[in-house]
Amino acid sequence: MSRFLTSKTAAIVGCPFRCPRVGVDQGPIHLVEAGLVDQLTELGWKVNFDGHHQFEEVNVAADPPIGKLKNPRLVSKVTEAVAKVVGGHAKKGELPVTLGGDHSLAMGTISGTLDAHPDACVIWIDAHADINTAETTDSGNIHGMPVSFLLGLGSPVPEFSWVKPALKPERLVYIGLRDIDAGEKRILKENNIKAFSMHEVDKYGIGRVVEMALDHVNPKRAYPIHLSFDVDALDPSVAPSTGTPVRGGLTFREGHYICEAIWETGLLVALDLMEVNPSLADAASVQQTVTVGCSLVRAALGKQLVRREQVD
Ligand SMILES: NC(=[NH2+])NCCC[C@H](N)C(=O)O
Ligand SMILES: [Mn+2]
Ligand SMILES: [Mn+2]
C-alpha cells in the first residue's frame, strides 16, 4: 500500500456520467455489479461504496454551447462535484477509485488529488491525449479537453474558473497514445510534455516504457501518483465497449503490466478507470470490457499474479 495513505481503504466513486446524458451511462454500474467491491475486499482493502453519484444537486436548466464546447455548464458542475468528493477521500488518507463515465471527469478527480497531494504526478493511459483547448477542439466534446484545463492552457473559459491550473507539464506523462489531433500535437510539443505512444511501446516493450515514464515524471520515486486509465488505451479487441475505440492498442497484459508496475512503486494515491460504455456494444463485448476493467483495478490495487514466495 502507498505510504501516502493512512489506511488500506479504497473509496469507490461511481460516476455514471456521459455528456450530454447524466445518470444514463451504465459503465460504473456494470463494474460494481460485476463484483468489484468484493474483489477488492478479497485483496485486503476496506472498501467504501455508498452508491453511485447521481449528481442530483446538479441542476442546469439550459446549457447551450459556449464556443464549440458542448454542455459546458453541466460538465463543469459535475466535475466540480467529483473534485470535492475525490479530494475529501484523499484528504482522509483513502484511495479514491473513480469509475466513469466520460474522461472529462478527470478534471474533477485530478483536481481533487492535487488538492490533497499538491506534488502528485499524473500517469495518463489513453489512445488520446485529451488535451484540446477551447480553441483547438474540433468535436467540442469536453472529454477531449480535461488535461488542458488542468494545465491552464488555452484562453480561460469562465464556466470552468473553479479548475485550478494545478498540474505542471513535467508532472504529466502519457502511455498508449495513437490518435492525437494536430492541435494537440502542437500543444504537447510546445509544453514539452512526455508521451509514449504505441510506437514506443512496440519499440521498447512495456516494461521499459513504464520505467522511462516513471523516470521522467517521478525520478526519485518520491511523488504520489494519480493513475488515470482510459479503457480505450487497450486494443478494441480487448476492450470493445468504449465510445472512441482506436485500433492498434495495448494488449491485455500490457494494460495490466502498467497497473501492476504502478502498484509496485508504493506511490499510488488515486485511480480512474474511465470510458467503459456498455450502451455501445452487444452483451458479450460489454461483459468482456467490464471484466477487463475490474481486472485492471485489481492489478492497480495490488493483486499479485503469483505469491512472491513462490518465485523467490
Ligand atoms: N476521452 C476520450 N475518449 N477522448 C477522445 C477525444 C477525441 C478527440 N481528440 C476530441 O477532441 O474529440
Ligand atoms: Mn481515449
Ligand atoms: Mn481519455
Image: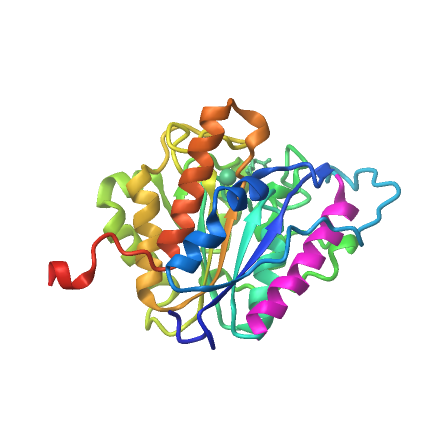
The answer to whether residue 219 is seen in the rendering is yes
Instruction: From the top left corner, tell me how far across and down residue 21 is, in percent.
Output: 72, 36
Q: Residue at x 84, y 46 (%)?
A: 60
Q: Give the left or right position of residue 87, taking residue 251 as reference.
A: right
Q: Give the left or right position of residue 272, taking residue 249 as reference.
A: right
Q: Give the left or right position of residue 178, taking residue 25 as reference.
A: left
Q: Residue at x 29, y 42 (%)?
A: 253
Instruction: From the top left corner, tell me how far across and down residue 38 is, in percent.
Output: 45, 53
Q: Is residue 90 magenta?
A: yes
The prevailing secondary structure element of the residues shown in magenta is: helix
Q: Give the left or right position of residue 28, taking residue 292 as reference.
A: right
Instruction: From the top left corner, tell me how far across and down residue 58 is, in percent.
Output: 80, 51
What segment is highlighted magenta in the picture? 71-91
Q: Residue at x 72, y 47 (%)?
A: 75
> Quadrant of the rendered structure where residue 1 is?
bottom left
Number of numbered discs: 0
Q: Residue at x 42, y 72 (%)?
A: 223
In depth, the one of 45 and 96 nearer the eye is: 45
| Image quarter hosting the C terminus | bottom left
Q: Is residue 297 above or below residue 47?
A: above
In depth, the one of 12 and 268 nearer the eye is: 12
Q: Is residue 309 magenta?
A: no
Furthest-right residue in this view: 61
The answer to whether residue 194 is seen in the rendering is no
Furthest-left residue in this view: 312
Instruction: From the top left corner, tell me how far across and down residue 34 is, in percent.
Output: 48, 42
In depth, the one of 27 and 108 nearer the eye is: 27
